[in-house]
Each structure stands twice: as C-alpha cells, then as structure tokens.
Amino acid sequence: MKRLYKFLMALAMTMTGGLVSQAATVENYTVDFNSEISTSNHDFRVASNWKHIVDKFEGSYGDVYYMTYTYKSSDGVEGTGALYCGEQKAGDYWSGEEQAVWDLLVTPVVNGKIYLKVKGSSYSGGYVELYKVNATGTAKDGSSLKKIAQNTDFTNSDYSEIEVDLAELGLDGQRVGIRASKVYLDDFRAESAEIEPEKSIKIVTAEPS
C-alpha cells in the first residue's frame, strides 16, 4: 500500500509539476458558453483560466446575499448556450436591505482587441462594464477598480457585440473583469490570450497502511 501511495504522489507531482510551465499564447481565443456552468456555486468560473471576484452583502441579521447568475442552454447566439447575469445587487428587496455589488467575471490575460456578445433581458437598465484587474485575477488593482469601458445600449431581441481595443488603451497583457447586470453574455473573443496549463489529475484518497 505504501508503494501505491508513493507511486500516486509521484505521479501527481510529475503531472502537476510539469503543468506549472509557462503560459502558451493562443491566437483567436474564444469562449462560446456552450458548456454548462454550475452557477449554484457563487465562485464558479466561466471556463478554464478564467477567475471570478465574488462580491456579497451581509444583512443586519447575519444573512449573506449574492447576485445571481444562470446558465441558459439555448438563449445564446443561434440558440446555443449563454450566461444570464442578474442585477448587480444583493440583499432582500422586500426588507429594504439591498445594495449594489461589484461581482466580476475575470478573463485570462488577453491582448489586442476583445469582443463580447450581449443581449438585454426583459428588464430595462441592463449594462456591461469592463474593469482592469490585477495579474492574479483575485483582487482590485490598487485601491479601486479602474473602469475601461461601459455599454448600456442593448435590446432584448438580438445580440450586439462589444469591442474594446486593449492595445489602444495601453492594457495589452491584462486580465479584464466583466461586471454585467441584467444581460445575457455569449461568444467572448480575444485576438490572443495567455493560457496556463491547469491540473488534469486529482487523487481523491490514497492512505498508506
């Protein structure tokens, strides 16, 4: 049993150790939202190499509230998958305990122009804001988030495409945070992205005797 344990640990170190290598540049990087996302976990990730800055609101009685996301299997472009983003608020509307949140879906490190298709919901006031996010994709860049783009002109009948030129803004090699409210998101594209290998093996248990 000890030999098996040592073998499994060595295998895990070999595979995960080799995966700590440099990121590979992927040209014409895309995420099509066609894979189901478990949005019941508040810290879900859109895809491999994405991150998620989760914001929340704590009520007066200790309750913790989050904004809502819902994966939609057929509400995307041409009936494909999409991600519905609820309002960027958290709390209990009926008790009056509710406030705005800054919950960000964070892209990998991207370069050049980026694109995102967006459709409004049946509710008015939908928007998408893009923010500069630090290299780890887990915290604000400095004392506050830097907004690099905002779009509010969306209809609920068809998708339109946001286009932002990061190179023109001096933000090449940057993670981008997407703050979306009351809209559907689909078909993210970047001229290129830096994609890091991620772990492909997980040992659930291996106890030595």
Image (cartoon, rainbow, N blue to C red):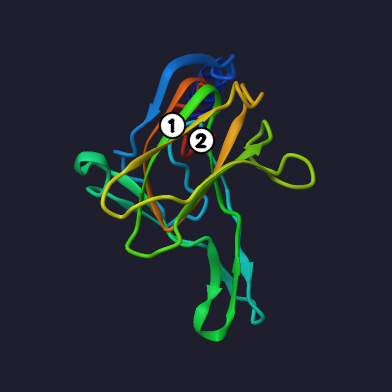
Name the residue at 22% across, 48% down: 74
In the image, residue 140 sits, relative to residue 123, either above or below, namely above
Mark whose residue sits in front, 2 or 1 = 1
Count of residue discs: 2
Q: Position of residue 49 (x, y in %)?
A: 51, 31
Q: Position of residue 181 (x, y in %)?
A: 47, 56
Give the quadrant of residue 35: top left
Please give the residue where the numbered disc 2 appears in the rendered image. 50
Please give the residue where the numbered disc 1 appears in the rendered image. 115
Precedes in sequence: disc 2 or disc 1 = 2
Name the residue at 27% across, 47% down: 158
Name the residue at 71% across, 44% down: 140
**Amino acid at circle 2:** Trp
Name the residue at 45% across, 28% down: 201
In the image, residue 48 sits, relative to residue 196, either above or below, namely below
- Mark 2 residue crowding within 10 angstroms, few (<14) / some (14–19) / many (20+): some
| Nearest to the observer: residue 153 or residue 132 | 153
Q: Position of residue 41 (x, y in %)?
A: 46, 54
Left or right? Give the position of 133 relative to 110: right
- Outermost bottom residue: 95
- Outermost right residue: 143
In the image, residue 45 sits, relative to residue 152, either above or below, namely above
**Amino acid at circle 1:** Tyr
- Mark 1 residue crowding within 10 angstroms, few (<14) / some (14–19) / many (20+): some
Instruction: Tell me the CA gap for discs 2 and 1.
Output: 16 Å
Q: Position of residue 133 (x, y in %)?
A: 65, 37
